[in-house]
Image (cartoon, rainbow, N blue to C red):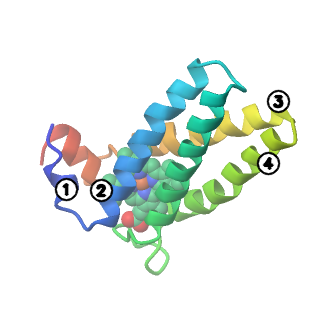
Amino acid sequence: MSLAPLLDAAPAIPLHALAAIAAFVLGIVQFAAPKGTLPHRTLGWIWVLLMVAVALSSFWIHTIRLVGPFSPIHLLSIFTLIMVPLAVWRAHTHRVADHRRIMIMTFTGALVIAGLFTLVPGRIMHAVAFGP
Ligand code: HEM
């Protein structure tokens, strides 16, 4: 394993990937820890900022150009920018079951599934994890 392929890439890419990895770790902490507490709210806002950074930074990444400069994965970024504020709004309005459902869906779809897809051969995280 080597971080060199990530750190050698254009700045948006390490920013994007490191924010995504931090959001993945923080997300696991959030799911395991007690809900509704001050730490849950504080870490939750940090997670929201990380996810916004992941999604926004992706619009400066164009390694898979399938639709003009964009790839279908950019739809996931738009989805994330809609679902994360919606999940926060559901918590704010005490619709806890909806908040929980949207957060689980976003974490699974955006971080677990998208994270696994970054490991396919030819992508930077594959080179990070398994070498060139
Ligand atoms: C653990 C999670 C993630 C990791 C490690 C990761 C890492 C990366 C890396 C290294 C790239 C650069 C291109 C490549 O070699 O693939 C990339 C591209 C991209 N990522 Fe992520 N990412 C993660 C999650 C996400 C999430 C949550 C989103 C959306 C909200 C996202 C959206 C994108 C998009 C749209 C691209 C650009 C694809 C293109 O080149 O056209 N990624 N990601």
Marks 2/3: CA–CA distance:
34 Å
Q: Amino acid at mark 3?
A: Ala
Residue at the spot x=41%, y=49% of the render? 19
Q: Give the position of the N terminus as an image quadrant.
A: top left
Marks 1/2: CA–CA distance:
6 Å
On residue 89, which mark appears? Answer: 4
Picture quarter containing residue 77? bottom right
Please say whether residue 6 is visible from this viewpoint: yes
Q: Amino acid at mark 1?
A: Leu
The location of residue 29, given as percent across then percent down, is 51, 25
In primary-sequence order, the first of circles 2 and 3 is 2
Quadrant of the picture in which ligand 1 is shown: bottom left
In primary-sequence order, the first of circles 4 and 3 is 4
Q: Which residue is mark 1?
A: 7
Q: Which residue is mark 2?
A: 14
Label 4 CB sits under 8 Å from any ligand 1 atom: no
Label 2 CB sits under 8 Å from any ligand 1 atom: yes
Q: Is disc 1 placed on a helix, strand or loop? A: helix
Marks 1/3: CA–CA distance:
40 Å
The location of residue 104, given as percent across then percent down, is 65, 33
In depth, the one of 104 and 99 nearer the eye is 99
Residue at the spot x=79%, y=39% of the render? 91
On residue 97, which mark appears? Answer: 3
Q: Residues within 10 Å of mark 1 (few under 14, many from 20)?
A: few
Picture quarter containing residue 97? top right
